[in-house]
Amino acid sequence: MTIAELRKDLKTKKPIFGADKAIKGLKTGNIEKVYLSKTCKEEYRKDIERYCKLSDVTVISLKEGGDEIGAICKKPFVISIISFAK
């Protein structure tokens, strides 16, 4: 279900890739949803989950690894964190 949800979001919204941009967006309140791959580094996962909880933002942990997420997003690189702006 979550991969279908990710694909839908990719078609309708502009994705933001990377931990730094996701954390910055969460701090400023500009993010509405965050997807984390199973290979996301634990330090980033903890920070993002904490900021999502404080900002009441949906965080979704995917079962797929970063390389599979990169392929779904049609990017030639590994993607561990995808966020979507409001």
Image (cartoon, rainbow, N blue to C red):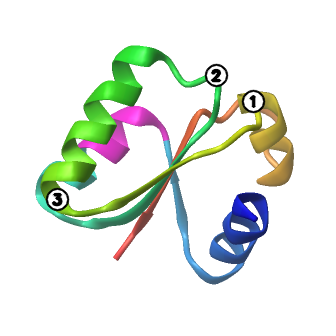
> Is the Cβ of the residue at disc 2 closer than 8 Å to that at disc 1?
yes
| 80 or 18: nearer the viewer | 80
Q: Is residue 17 above or below residue 42?
A: below
Residue 83 position within the rendered picture, expressed as x and y whole percent measured from the top left: 46, 55
At which x and y percent is residue 8? Answer: 71, 77
Check disc 1 and give the amino acid type.
Gly
Query: What residue sits right under mark 2 in the picture?
Result: 39
- Which residue is nearer to you in this view: 82 or 5? 5
Q: Which residues lie in the magenta part?
A: 18-23
Q: Is residue 3 above or below residue 75?
A: below
Label 2 vs 1, first from the N-terminus: 2
Label the magenta part by its dominant secondary structure: helix
Picture disc at residue 55: 3
Work out how far the residue at label 3 is from the one at label 1, CA to CA, in angstroms. Answer: 26 Å
Q: Pointer 2: residues within 10 angstroms few (<14), some, or many (20+)?
A: some
What is the CA distance from the residue labelled 2 to the residue labelled 3? 24 Å
Q: Which residue type carries mark 3?
A: Ser
Mark 3 vs 1, N-terminal side? 3
Secondary structure type for disc 1: loop
Q: Earlier in the sequence, mark 2 or mark 3?
A: 2
Q: Residue 70's quadrant in the figure?
A: top right
Tell me which corner region of the image, top left, top right, bottom left or bottom right, holds residue 34.
bottom left
